[in-house]
Image: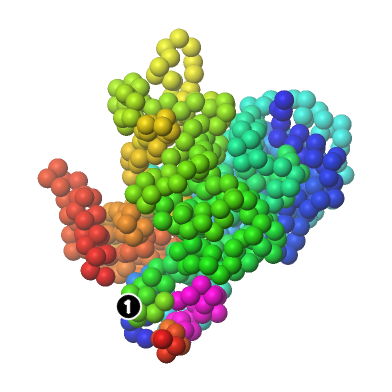
Amino acid sequence: MYRNILEYLEQTVRRVPDKAAYADERTSITFREVYDQSRAIGTYLYKQGIYKQPVVVFMKRQPKTIAAFFGVVYGGSFYVPIDEEMPHFRVELIFNNLDPRAVICDQDSLDSLAQYGYRGIVYLYDDIIKTEADDALLSDIRDRAIDTDPVYIVYTSGSTGIPKGIVGSHRAVIDYIESLSEVLEFSEDTIFGSQSPLYFDACLREIFGTAKFGAQTYLIPRSLFMFPLKLVEFLNEYKINTICWVVPALTMISSFKVLDKVVPQYLHTIAFVSEVFPIKQFNIWRKALPNARFVNLYGPTEATGICCYYKVDRDFAENEVLPIGRPLRNTEIILLDENNRIPPRGELGEICIRGTCLTHGYYNDMERTREVFVQNPLNDKYPELIYRTGDLGRINERGELIFVSRKDFQIKHMGHRIELGEIEANVNLIEGVHSACCVYDRESAMIALYYVGELSPGDVAAILKQKLPRYMMPNIIEALDRMPLTTNGKIDRAYLKEYTENKRKRR
Amino acid sequence: MNTLLRMLKGLHPDVDFETCETLIDDKILDSFDIITLVADINSEFDVTIPAEEIIPENFNSARALYALIERLSNED
């Protein structure tokens, strides 16, 4: 029975201290180094009076950044990963919401930190790891820790334009890692190829899966996801056998017919998340790797990561969809209709999640937390929270859960969860823009932005690039003379959607 | 070349594609752009870019990309 995620690391460092835990093309860090450096960081932070609070880790995606995460947790605080690749404006909003007292930097990121208007304390990673670890102090911090204490905060898109910081606890992460590793059969032989940035919840399974099993994680350079042949060669060079990637990363490989030329020969576990895998592309993968295990994963950041899985166990025709299957152990999925009742089997309901996997909600935002972390409407006898995902699902004739669509304007684009409202909110802030509307054309996977204003599309694009993460940038930006309105005076999204579709067809 | 420049401009209206030589190195193009470009080049120029040509060197500038298209269409 684990109570603290550090127990994973402590158990493993006794067994395989000198094994490389986390690596990229240039550097790697062993379990002993992670252990020693993170205990030094924890000792240092606590002695500086930093305890039970968010500590920003502002470092690039590299192995030692993960040691900094562990270090913050050793000090009894919780880490907030931020990366220079995140746009300036977004980092500012995050600093606003978080109001952190301390930031850990490395030499490279130190200079860029100044531009965010942050005035608090800055610690240099390479300096603070020289601290001598204080065993008595660290064990005292641990004695006072509770398994519901936070481990991290990660930020996701929010429809008002303000990102939401999701607070994950030890207990939720442990529940997640224990259950997911049963399904994907992680072991000491697992070699992960990690695709996600470190500031998303997606990397939790690799970071803590590696710590628990004494496995190994390679941080794959982001640029390789543009060049599919090189990507597969990387998988082979480092003998990567397990991946949990967003669907577009996999379809890019299959649609460019890379698998005809080179096959990832060590890969035996292929899990995919974030959106529906087109069956045509999926079947190319399955044909190329007939003995591999393919698992469809589903879950919101608010429930720590993954809460449902489906191990592919039959053939699928091109007009079928892969189910999201069934909940992980110790998690329940409840479908609720508009009246908060369970719909008849086979009918649509909102996917709601019950279990230890629930995070604590949004940092410094009780109001938005209470909107979606709500009392289970099926229980009026004692307090019990469920998380309302806003996703609609139904149960198929085999008893498997199927994801159908979103309730609101949240979309999945290139593996990222995006609120169209957040893009619009940012466009509306631009001087010289009078109104704006974003629609998503699922067929072409393009975000289209329409606006009315004096600025040229090039100017709007240049300003937006300062504010939005790369993956949220609209793929089409067009100025309109006037915004189409419905009879109620609302922006006519349906019209703009159709307009975008027609545009695509004319191309 | 003009068709290609128009295509690129459609993806990033704020970038000067006639002079920029670091589209990949400076992370101006992302994986979505590459996918879109490969598909659009296929439909506009009737050229299929094979996987082994989808490498940074061929996408770093409009000029390099155009040279690739010319080379591939001459091979057909």
Q: Is residue B67 magenta?
A: yes
* Left or right: A294, with A131 as reference point: left
Q: Is residue A7 magenta?
A: no
> Residue A483, image x and y in percent?
19, 56
What residue appears at the point 42 percent right and 30 percent down from the top-left corner? Answer: A399
**Residue type indicated by callout 1:** Glu
Number of numbered markers = 1
Q: Nearer the viewer, residue A484 or A229?
A: A229
Q: Seen from this angle, which residue lies furthest top?
A: A381
* Left or right: A397, with A206 as reference point: left
Majority secondary structure of the magenta segment?
A: helix
Q: Report if residue A116 is visible in the image.
A: no
User: Residue at label 1?
Assistant: B44
* Left or right: A71, with A201 as reference point: right
What residue appears at the point 40 percent right and 17 percent down from the top-left corner? Answer: A378
* Left or right: A240, with B3 as reference point: right
Q: In the figure, residue B3 lies in which quadrant?
A: bottom left
Looking at the figure, which quarter contains the C terminus of chain A? Answer: bottom left
Q: Report if residue B46 is visible in the image.
A: yes
Vertical order, A492 against B35 (above or below): above
> Residue A159, image x and y in percent?
38, 44
